[in-house]
Amino acid sequence: MSKPQMIQTDLDSVLTAQEIAEIDAELGHVPYKSGAAIDALKIVQAKRGWVSDECLQAIARRLEMSAEELEGVATFYNLIYRRPVGEKVILFCDSVSCWICGCDDIKEKISAALGVDYGETTADNQYTLLPVPCLGACDRAPVMMVGDDLVTHIDEAQVKALFGDAKTGGDQ
Ligand code: FES
């Protein structure tokens, strides 16, 4: 899909003054502008919840990268969201230790409670469910992040306590 052509003045007005100031501060810590790519993406995502095509192009211009190069960074780094997400993102570990400890069954219970599958957001915009590789807490598997909180040894009772039984339905 071809991206819309943007004139320079449009790109200049996409990022806020604060976002630009924070990105420029990161540029002071790296030898090449492209070295600030992940931090710049995180700065914009922290303010907006996700990184739109428009923002990605504006960041790329600030870092003197092509939009395609920056897209490659954003795609590789799976904590940069290129689509809108809910208030909290559930990063559900589906790697081997969690799989051995029954994460598939837990994931089904979460999906049933929230009415969403991987990549979907609940209709009330509270949660987006995403699979992630190992979260580095294998000794406490199954594991997930709910927003900023690490949830370990997940079992059915925890799923019920966190998400209840109500199906809210996916919207993506
Ligand atoms: S495999 Fe799930 S935290 Fe390591």
Image: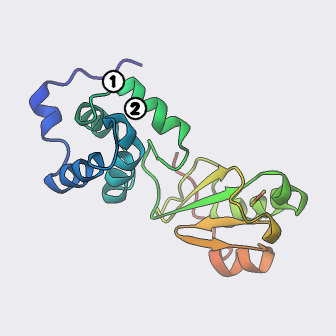
Q: Which residue is mark 1?
A: 66
Coordinates of residue 160 in the picture (x, y in percent): 71, 77
In the picture as drawn, the residue positioned furthest to the right comes out as 100
Q: Is residue 69 left or right of residue 47?
A: right
User: What number is the disc on residue 70?
Assistant: 2
Please give left or right for residue 60 compared with residue 99 in the image: left
Quadrant location of the N terminus in the rendered image: top left
Relative to 157, residue 72 above or below: above
Question: Which residue type carries mark 1?
Answer: Ser
Can you tell me whether the CB of the residue at mark 2 lies under 8 Å from the nearest atom of ligand 1?
no
Residue at mark 1 to residue at mark 2: CA–CA distance: 6 Å
The answer to which quarter of the image holds residue 146 is bottom right
Classed neighbour count for the residue bearing mark 1: other residues with Cα under 10 Å, few (<14), some (14–19), many (≥20): some
Q: Is residue 32 visible?
A: yes
- In the figure, is residue 12 to the left or right of 25? left
Q: Is residue 117 visible?
A: no
- Kindly indicate the quadrant of the structure image that contains residue 52: top left
> Does residue 5 sit above or below 21 in this rendering?
above
CB under 8 Å between discs 1 and 2: yes
Q: Residue at x 38, y 49 (%)?
A: 39
Ligand 1, image quadrant it occupies: bottom right
Which residue shows up at 36% across the image and 43% down it?
36
